[in-house]
Amino acid sequence: MRQILGWCALVLAMVATGEEAETVNENSYAFRDEALARANALAENEGFDEAYLQSLLLAVEPDESVLEKISRPAEKTKTWAEYRPIFLDQARIDNGVAFWDEYAEVLSRAEETFGVDPAIVVAIIGVETRYGKVTGNTPAFAALSTLCFDYPKRAAFFCEQWDEFLRLARRENWNPLQIQGSYAGAMGMGQFMPTSYTNDALDYDGDGKVDLWNSADDAIGSVANYLANRDWESGGKYVERLEEAPTAEHFGQSHKPYFDRNSLFEKKQEDEQIVMEQKGAETPVMVGSLVLEGLEGEEWWLTYHNFFVITRYNTSPLYAMAVIDLAAELREQREDQTSDDE
């Protein structure tokens, strides 16, 4: 019965879009059982108009460019030496300082409210979209449909985003076919996935709506809120570079802060003072560890809690390193300008 109802809805959708049966694109998701079933579930359980959802499915088909891009992200195909320059170019630094200067009051307010370093907030927006200049030109509904129904590796995640995108579109009165974003369906200055848009995005300029495309205030508040909601530690460390390769066998196996810092150092570690300080601490200092391929060979890093929080935004440790380095450059250049003005 459900399948019959699904095809009836499809016919209604054809009428709604003015399409004749013989001209309908049979590659569209309206001809895929799993897509019909998901649309039917939203209609039955959440009151969506079934014919309307079918009309949306008629308008989109698998996007091979999306599948190609998600299978070869820069974070997985480049070394740190290759990845870092992509996000540390002088134009991005200069524009980041200008963005920080323009929205200094909003960033200060966000820091006071959420405890998040404003340099990190600016850097994330800079890495994601060059401060709102490049928010993506891939139709979000087509991207999410492709990844939900044709990318089995992460289908559960992207199908959840597909559902939430449609809920957002209904709530915000969007035309789902007009919204554009990244190849993964991320949207706005901060490139929020639909569930993050729902759970973390804020109306930070007080105009009564959340707009992550056109309101830098909303983007700043939302990024800070996102990090705070994942237990950002105000004033916490990010990373620490080591001068020599540690002797612990498990060094570099996880950047998540799962290890007592002492466990990463053995007796051969030259800096005995660090070991002694940690032994005397009341509670262990939990760190992760990271080995990167830099310009001059291997680099050894300790990673702290806030580093892990940044990887909740993007799971790649290279991404987190780029954000941290860009934040440091922005802060240094801004402080230099302040000194010159004095």
Image (cartoon, rainbow, N blue to C red):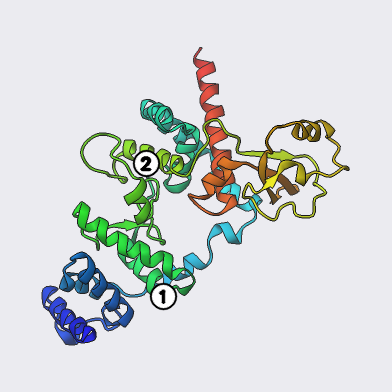
Query: What residue would you read off at disc 2?
Result: 222
Q: CA distance from mark 1 to mark 2?
A: 30 Å
**The N terminus lies in which quarter of the figure?**
bottom left
* Callout 2 secondary element: helix
x%, y% of residue 182? Answer: 39, 57
Q: Amino acid at mark 1?
A: Asp
Tell me if I can see residue 174 in this picture: no
Q: Nearer the viewer, residue 153 or 65?
A: 153
> Which residue is depicted at the point 11% across and 78% down?
15
Q: How many neighbours does mark 1 have within 10 angstroms: few (below 14), some (14-19), or many (20 or more)?
A: some
> Which residue is depicted at the point 25% across and 59% down?
167
Q: Nearer the viewer, residue 284 or 85?
A: 284
**Of callouts 1 and 2, the N-terminal one:** 1
State the mark number for residue 150: 1
Q: Amino acid at mark 2?
A: Ser
State the mark number for residue 73: none
x%, y% of residue 126? Answer: 46, 42
Q: How many neighbours does mark 2 have within 10 angstroms: few (below 14), some (14-19), or many (20 or more)?
A: many
x%, y% of residue 268? Answer: 88, 43
* Callout 1 secondary element: helix
x%, y% of residue 319? Answer: 55, 49
Residue 338, above or below 247: above
